[in-house]
Amino acid sequence: MTPVVLALHDIVKHYRRPRQRLWAPGPVVQALRGVSLQVRAGQSMGIVGESGSGKSTLARVAMALERPTLGSVRWSGQDPNALDASDLRLARRHVQMVFQDPYGSLDPRQRIGQIVAEALESSAVAKAREQVEESLLAVGLSERDADKYPHEFSGGQRQRIAIARALITRPRLIVADEPVSALDVSVQAQVLNLLADLQEALGLTYLFISHDLAVVNHVCDEVAVMYAGRIVELGTPGQLFQAAAHPYTRALVGELPRDRPGVAHGPRRRLQAQTSVRVQAGPTLESGACAYAQRCAYRQARCQVEAPELRVISQGHQAACHVAESVMVEHLGEQ
Amino acid sequence: MSAAGTIERVDHDRTRPAAILEVSRLTGTLNTARGPAQALRGIDLSLAPGQTLGLAGESGCGKSMLALAVMGLLPAGAQVSGSIRFQGQELIGASDAALCRLRGNRIGMVFQEPMTTLNPLHRVGDQVAEPLRLHQGLSRASARAEAARLLDRVRLPHAAQSLRAYPHQLSGGQRQRVTIAMALACGPDLLIADEPTTALDVTTQREILELINELVAASGMTLLMISHDLDALARIADRMMVMYGGSVVESGPLDAVVTERAHPYTRGLFAARPRWSALGEQGAKRRLQTIPGRVPELADLPPGCAFSNRCAWTLDACRAGLPAALAIGPQHEARCVRLNEPGFRS
Amino acid sequence: MRWLERAWRHPGFVTGTALVGLLVGAALLSFAWTPYPYAELDIPHKLAPVSNAHWLGTDSLGRDIASLLIVGARNSIAVGLIAVGIGVTFGVALGLLAAARRGWVEELIMRLSDFTFAFPALLTAIMLTAVYGPGLAISIVAIGIFNVPVFARIARSAALAVWSREFVLASRACGRGPWHISLHHVLPNIMPVLIVQATIQFAVAILAEAALSYLGLGTQPPQPSWGRMLNEAQQMLFQAPWLAVYPGLAIALTVLGLNLMGDGLRDLLDPRLARQR
């Protein structure tokens, strides 16, 4: 069995907002409400959700940039939150991150060479230069780019630089937080291809976070759909796209335009019925109700009082819904 | 009418039914840090009343510049030539006062970033009421009542209470609804939406798109929607225009552009989107088709066709000058010198 | 560098730099040569008007005013450099520390700054001179102390803005600790703000020294000082009003030059950075 590179167990993360009254503490935002997942070596796990679902918080907790309120994080068996500063520094070589904003994630005052070498030890300057050039070539840039500044590059190129920075320590795992969301369509395609190529060449493992299911489809073996701080469905892209077992996934997938030959894109197709009432980001929900119930087309009485647990629906496919089977069957029927 | 299979050149001076917006040979030059940039190169477009035109393209193609040129809102130092006629009135060279009478009144505009479009220090209700008080001279009370009605129309939850809210108290989607209400306040004949859904969540995007769709259909308004999201445009547009390097490379009825994809850039753009194909390849990771190279800065456009240095079918003729617009089908044209060749577009 | 080209076209910056250059040039010159030794008294020729012998005339003790001015420039620069230097070194360090550690460290540093702010430089100088006796060194220390909270505050708020940016998060994700981040990411990014503030504080320091010397708490005779020259001129106001003009003009032009330079630097450094996308 391939080793588990990243394991999250029952992660709960709460934030306390600033107090609004002098005598009472501020409200608690439940960003993550019990998330567990495992990513095996060489695989790509996608996390899909809208803002407020907790996916970015999950990325930061997985990177040990924030401590979980409850639950544990393991990098190849090791708990980064239990390490001291120097051991953690060493451990971080194996887990790197690519961020969403190509303009914000690079220090405008540093040269590319410095930026890419960020994770390397400060000693051995010559060797560092060699590694930097190697990294830049691997992402399709040239060695001469190491002496330039970020403002001389376009968004897509900056994302390549961010990827080069993440690669330099030969990590096992890369956490990519919406790496292509800020890019144009054609540039997006280039960067996605690059990520796929690098995974094959270097045996990388990805935790790929996105709001776009179609993008995730191209990079990921497994996808976890998040809603209001919980994983509501987990499965392969094929299972999610054809036999989604959670109404939210169904809603996300249902709107994906499909390439069916002979059928032109229908303009003014009616969208799935969605109420305009939205759950605020990081809700403080009464425990014991399904977070999606207010918007759900399959809502039943049971959903208002009992929050469904994530359970196995079929091989490699889990969903947190009381009526998961009927949702799945209905979706299959539409194919 | 010539024999089927040959392409005619398009004659733009032919009389056509009264268009609400008629742009001819629009050329715009901006001053950038790298010297003068031709942001708009000979744009022609014609919008019939009640039509929705989807303007597609990536960053730096000039689509936002086109919207700003129509509104007369290009940055100082920009030079514009050609003609923009709105309901017969020439907008280029029009006085500031004349343009102000049109903006927010007969032409409404929705921008990408609702947080910067709305003044964070003013209440939402006051901001929606502003165009009403300015252009229709309503009193404070009646403007407020109308604003409440508008907010309800854009399906803002708790519209009456929201009048007194500040922008930061609303979510992104709610703020965008407010900007739409502001743009529609005086019942404009033309609505220009510049990337209205880009800054929003994926589910909110659908809601806002649906809202715009519905409002436009209900009022018979003409809509010019600009987006880099081809799928969003495909949902609501009647006609589609694709821009690259400051010029319109392809323009035609939605179905024609989306299925035929005559211009090599259109072809590349549509092919580069990540799709889910229901036929086979379930979950298999496929390479995406990409267009090699990257979008040039407007100040560094190659001579002739702007796409020539990235196109797989470039000839020397492509670099000679901006290709003329050739007709491919009814109201469907593209700027490519090779459209004539048999087998080129299959 | 393109930066220099742009700088050359900014009229305020060029004027300011020219004026400051004049000051620095005069001060440097004074080490090598002065028209007359500044302390040389020439009572028979006291209060002489402008002439070929004395380009700006002489003061009440017959000293050459031109020499006094350019040697006085030395002191002004010394005060500016050292006092601002103290402020920058300690203030920026404290500001960076406050922004990096947050919590009680930040609170402590900020409250100490507030406390120090409450005492005007003048009061600090008076307290110090009461203990250690008056002099140039003491006035430098007093002004320097006052500069520390100025830079601490500015450095802290600018640093906080940088800490919230994504490239800092990326640096943390690479395993870098707060020291490295403060030195390699935060400090370079807050430089523009600090540079501009330094030129402003330079001008303030010169004015403060002049005030202290005027009150007799700064440079002591026979060391020349623009502030003391003003004091002496005040006593001769009805007999030789022009005596006040020279040091006054010197101070005014220096401060003006520094302010113009600071404004110019702000214009040149900030929006350019924002526009380089």
Image: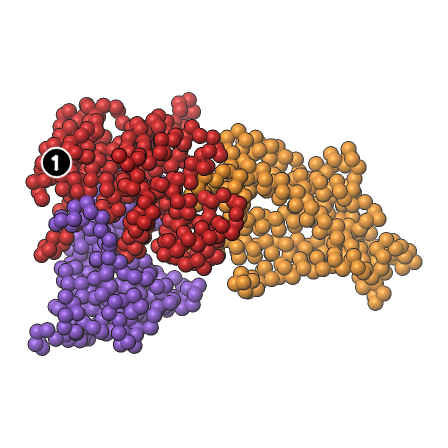
Chain colours: A red, B purple, C orange
Which residue is drawn at the image coordinates 39% and 45% (left, top)?
A: A170
In the visual, does A152 lie left or right of C192? Answer: left
Can residue A111 be seen here? yes
Which residue is drawn at the image coordinates 60% and 35% (left, top)?
A: C113
Image spot of residue B246 (x, y percent): 30, 66
Q: In which quarter of the image is the N terminus of chain C?
A: bottom right
- The residue sitting at the front extreme is A1
Q: Is mark 1 on a helix, strand or loop?
A: helix
Can residue B83 be seen here? no
Label 1: chain letter:
A
Quick one: C144 or B304, which is closer to the camera? Answer: B304
In the visual, does B68 lie left or right of A311? Answer: right
Q: Mark 1 points at which residue?
A: A328
Which residue is drawn at the image coordinates 9% and 44% (left, top)?
A: A335
Image spot of residue A141 (x, y percent): 39, 57
Tell me the amino acid under the disc marked 1: Met
Q: Is residue B34 above or below residue B114?
A: below
Quick one: B283 or C55, which is closer to the camera? Answer: B283
Image spot of residue A57 (x, y percent): 34, 36
Q: Quadrant of the C terminus of chain C?
A: bottom left
Q: Determine which quarter of the picture holds residue B239.
A: bottom left
Quick one: C83 or C240, which is closer to the camera? Answer: C83
